[in-house]
Amino acid sequence: MAKKTVKDLNVAGKRVIVRCDFNVPRKDGKITNDNRIIQALPTIKYLLENNAKVILMSHLGKVKTEEDKAKNNLDVVGARLAELLPGTKVTFCPVTRGPELEKDVADLKDGEILLVQNTRYEKGESKNDEELGKYWASLGDVFVEDAFGSVHRAHASTVGIPSNIAENGLGFLVEKEVDMLGKAVDEPAHPFVAIIGGAKVSDKIGVIENMLAKADKVIVGGGMAYTFLKAMGENVGNSLVEEDKIQLAKDTLEKGKGKIVLPVDNVIADAFSNDANIKVVEGDIPEGWMGLDIGPKSIELFKDTLKGAKTVVWNGPMGVFEMPNFEKGTLAVCEAISELPDAITVIGGGDSAAAAIQLGFQDKFSHISTGGGASLEYMEGKTLPGIAVISEK
Ligand code: ADP
Ligand code: MG
């Protein structure tokens, strides 16, 4: 069954609370990348055009101390929103509860925006405190979930509010994410190839297991491949290895027989540095050397594995792509995926998305997820509480 979306809601004249993901990166108090604010605009504009009273809420950074509050004041986002929406009145309320907030809400007119202070100013936010969820819900008539980056967290602003309000639905951003991730993970066209990489087996074992159940092939690259190679008895030198995950890797290899595809050669270096000495080896990695990227034969093998795929899910870089000497594997995988004719291609994971964008593939995939942790949990087959709580159509 499909979830209600903003279009299924009656919003004219209503106080509509929208949970956005305005957790933007900043330097010296200035926003360095406003992509998350841009991504929230379709829902906000739709609500403004439909004469809602728009109440926006978001967290920003981590708030533990009073000092953190000053560092993570959401007013910077208010200023940017006002620039992005000329002609719209944007009020920023510097507190998360009390008479000032309640007055700002009461004064809000149709077609205007009220941005509420950082939800994490409240200790009860991350505990999904019942009173807090009810209080925030009392400020609105309708709730819209549009913070994809936060839907894997059962917090007061993501779960407490929609549980305590008359009507709720998904915003356009979350709807798109659920639609694309759902198409790839839950109803994949076959052949379905998953590519899993990145640093650690422990971070990705859930994804590997879910993909082994659903995909036709599971390519494993990146730092975590070395734990698998070691589990197969290969020497991996000083490569990244999780000793306590070797048995798990063995069991996974056994389960995934015929499905798991591992690197057959590696770009190795004598230090974790772009300036290290570099060579390519097949098989054992000598002591004092570490694998930092997949090698050319692995690239060919992975490309071959991808041939004919109709669905590709990719999570985790193939090497230390942040250093130019170890980006080739990730680049080749990006190229191979983006050249597949008529395949649904989806990237999840914060660093994988960053890699694809950094390497110039921003528009070459069907979908690049905006939520690192949330997309990962989706790929693991976990329920995302902020989506589960939303009503069915
Ligand atoms: P995502 O955020 O997409 O889920 P991860 O966080 O799991 O991805 O992994 C990304 C990190 O893995 C990158 O910073 C990358 O440098 C690192 N990485 C990839 N391959 C290796 C390797 N061979 N050795 C050490 N680190 C690696
Ligand atoms: Mg990451």
Image (cartoon, rainbow, N blue to C red):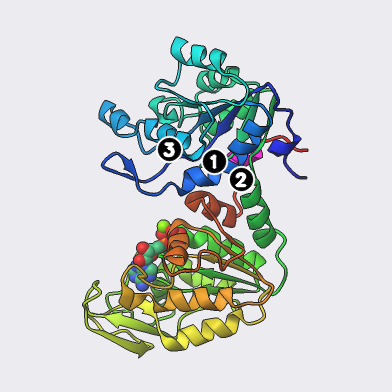
- Percent x, y of residue 245: 41, 64
Give the residue drawn at x 34%, y 86%: 284
Q: Indicate yes or no whether the magenta region holds residue 386.
A: yes
Identified at 48% across, 72% down, the residue is 250
Calculate the distance from the C-alpha at mark 2 to the C-alpha at mark 1.
7 Å
- Find disc 2 in the rendering and name its residue: 174
The residue carrying mark 1 is 147
SS category of the residue bearing label 3? helix
Q: Which residues are magenta?
A: 384-388
Where does the N terminus fall, quadrant-wise?
top right
The kind of residue tagged 1 is Ala
Front-most of residues 199 and 55: 55
Assess whether residue 260 is covered by the magenta stretch.
no
Read off the residue under disc 3. 80
Determine the main secondary structure of the stretch shown in magenta.
helix
Q: Is residue 16 left or right of residue 297?
A: right
Q: Is mark 2 within 8 Å of ligand 1?
A: no
Q: Is residue 199 at least partly visible in the picture?
A: no
Asked if the residue under mark 1 is in contact with the one under mark 2, i.e. CB atoms within 8 Å, the reply is yes
Kind of residue at badge 3: Arg
Q: Is residue 27 left or right of residue 216?
A: left
Choose the circle earlier in sequence order: 2 or 1.
1
